[in-house]
Amino acid sequence: MHWSPNVLPAVEILSNPVDALKGLLLHVTDILMPQDCFVCGSVAGGAAVCAPCRSELIRHADRACPVCALPTVDGRTCGHCLRQPPAFDATWAVFDYAFPVDAMLHALKYRHHLALADFFAHELSELAAEARLRADVILPMPLHPRRLAERGFNQAVEIARPLARANAWPLELAAIRRVRNTVAQAALDREARLHNPRGAFEGVQPLTGLRVVVVDDVMTTGATLNELARTLKRQGAAWVGNLVIARTPVPD
Ligand SMILES: [Zn+2]
Ligand SMILES: [Zn+2]
């Protein structure tokens, strides 16, 4: 239960100020460090998700295309990537985009459930270690300034920050800007505009010869990640890998 100012009667503070203060601090600690499991609501000992619920989350397929992470029978490069290689070189996904991971990502994005960012960062860190990932910089998927102003934060940055810190990887927040290609976009109808990421990014700083690891929450068609990778390569990046929390099983 969360404390709010109007449930703590003033008389209680006056009659037993020490206990009232202790209670207040406990409540504040609860708010700052939620201890209830996001999935089942049981006490999770400071983690955002308890161990049993964590073990039941649907992990992304072991056998997947190394380029786009789409599940393949033998773990080899998929037909899409063979026919039309994307601008990125590799992709790893922790989970399938399914319940309750979808609800967790939604809560992080729209309800500022920031404890989940740490949880996801930890999962990405484990995946990166398994993959023996080498990174020169970590670059969270940039958010358009207008979106950032509406939402107040970029969930990809919140996930990337603890990941970068834990692995001593530099976090790159300024090299690429999300822009809108207004001329080209205006000619498209709404549906096409939403799915057309062409010209969505602008290179601001060079990334010459660097191995860039992009962090994003969900990968569906991979079109936006592809466009970002294209921009990164134009800025001189030697290699681009995607680390995503969840992958939709089949592209839309
Ligand atoms: Zn649980
Ligand atoms: Zn592929």
Image: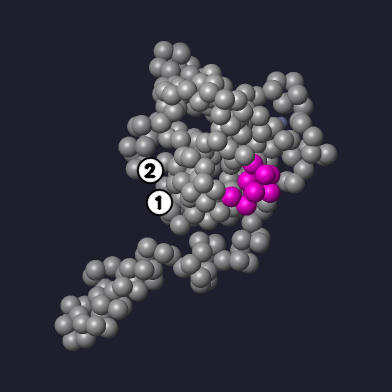
Q: Secondary structure at mark 1?
A: loop
Indicate the position of residue 7 as horizontal and vertical percent values: 26, 73
Which label sits in the foreground, 1 or 2?
Answer: 2
Vertical comparison of 217 with 23: above or below: above
Labelled disc at residue 153: 2
Judge whether residue 159 can be spotted in this image: no
**252 and 107: which is toward the camera:** 107
Per the rendered image, the range of residues in magenta is: 125-133
- Tell me the residue that label 1 is attached to: 112
Q: Residue at x 48, y 19 (%)?
A: 199
The spot of residue 70 in percent (x, y) is 71, 37
Vertical side of 3 occupied by 68: above or below: above
- Residue 93 in the image, given as x and y percentages of width and height: 64, 43
Numbered tag placed on residue 204 in the rendering: none
What secondary structure prevails in the magenta region?
helix
Please tell me how crowded label 2 is: few (under 14), some (14-19), or many (20+) other residues with Cα within 10 Å. Answer: some
Q: For ligand 2, give the image quadrant.
A: top right
Q: Secondary structure at mark 2?
A: loop
